[in-house]
Amino acid sequence: MCEECNELSRRNFLKGALIGGAALGMGLFDRNLLHAQATNIKFSTWHPPMGKEVKTVWTPMLEDLKKKSGGKMAYTMYAGAALGKGPEHFDIVAKGLSDMGYFTATWTPGRFPLTDVLSLAVWVDGKDIAADIGNAVYNRALKDEFKNVKVLELNGCIQSFIWSKKPISKMADLKGMKLRSPGGHQTNYIKSLGAEPVFIPLGDVYMAMETGTVDGIVTCPPLIQGFKLYEVAKHATVLTFGCVSEGTVMNLNSWNKLPDDQKKLVEQECTNPFRTTGGLNQADYKVIMKEIADKGVKFIDLPKAEAEQWYAKFQDVTRTWVKDLEAKGLPARKVVAIMNEECEKRKVNLVACPPEFKKA
């Protein structure tokens, strides 16, 4: 190219840059062009990579974002302990190690005190229903506990049972037993029944049951599948212990960077990912239970009178929990009443709610 042409090209470049910069500064530039490159969502979860949560909820959810955005959104999955241990997963998102992720509030005692209401013993047989309840309670009572992230959904998981090496059919059978607890209310439920709660990582439970370090575990059916605990726990006592408080959150900076159309899509797909994907919903729960039974696990249904004795113990745990939080100035009784109200709207029985707490 000749020197004159070079000079002309330089002049045109500088002229275009000046005009473009001025237009951008004046707000005349189409900002959507800035987002032409795909948004890559780094998603983190403690769930095992081959577990139902990743295979039937998180991967389909992220694939839906990719498809429905017309390829403008992509993702990278960090499952299991790829970015950190289970209790670290809220901070993994909040601090920006990932953009979006699933965390369990119960594993960080005292950090989300009122959110523990979601883990009270309740009969919920689908995470789609659990998310409906959790989202409603969040909107009414829990927002102050999550100011540093964008909450997409909260839930109390689905009911947990006792999964054990030996059959348990009455409270007296629990005396002296060591049961792995997820923490929170479940720890106090186990104590109230005369057993000893033990907290160890889920990944260590299989060996702990094989060696006799623990006699059983309180957890939900999907995790029995995900960690193959049906191989060592051949008996399940069907009585709800509730489960853990958990949810899907997004890093605030990552959220704020999304264009409006992508924000709308994320809320559409992630506010109840169990319903939009069909994973771990009520219909899937029945399939999971059958699959576990097919592995040789025997389910033990407690007689109604026996179950009511257990639930009376759970209600005492709720009373103590409320008293402790109220002493710290937190409106725990009101939050329990809200939780019970949202459960009743969906024909769900919050068995751990004392009768006198059912109205604020």
Image (spheres, helix red, strand yellow):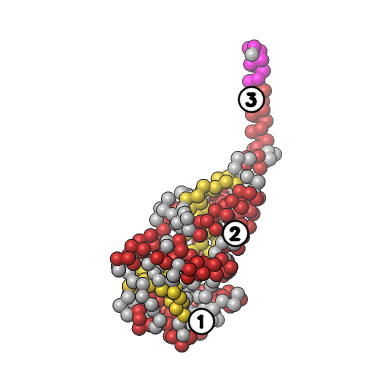
On the question of residue 76 being in view, the answer is yes
Of 211 and 293, which appears nearest the observer? 293
Marks 3 and 2: which is nearer the front? 2
Element carrying mark 1: helix
Residue linked to disc 2: 277
Q: CA distance from mark 3 to mark 1?
A: 71 Å
Mark 2 residue type: Thr
Residue 64, position in %: x, y? 61, 52
Name which quarter of the figure residue 60 lies in. Answer: bottom right
Magenta stretch in the rendered image: 2-10
- Judged by depth in the image, the label closer to the viewer, 3 or 1, is 1
Sequence-first tag of 3 and 1? 3
Residue 80 locus on image (x, y percent): 43, 54
Q: Which residue is mark 3?
A: 14
Foreground disc of the pair 2, 1: 2
Residue reaching furthest to the right: 28
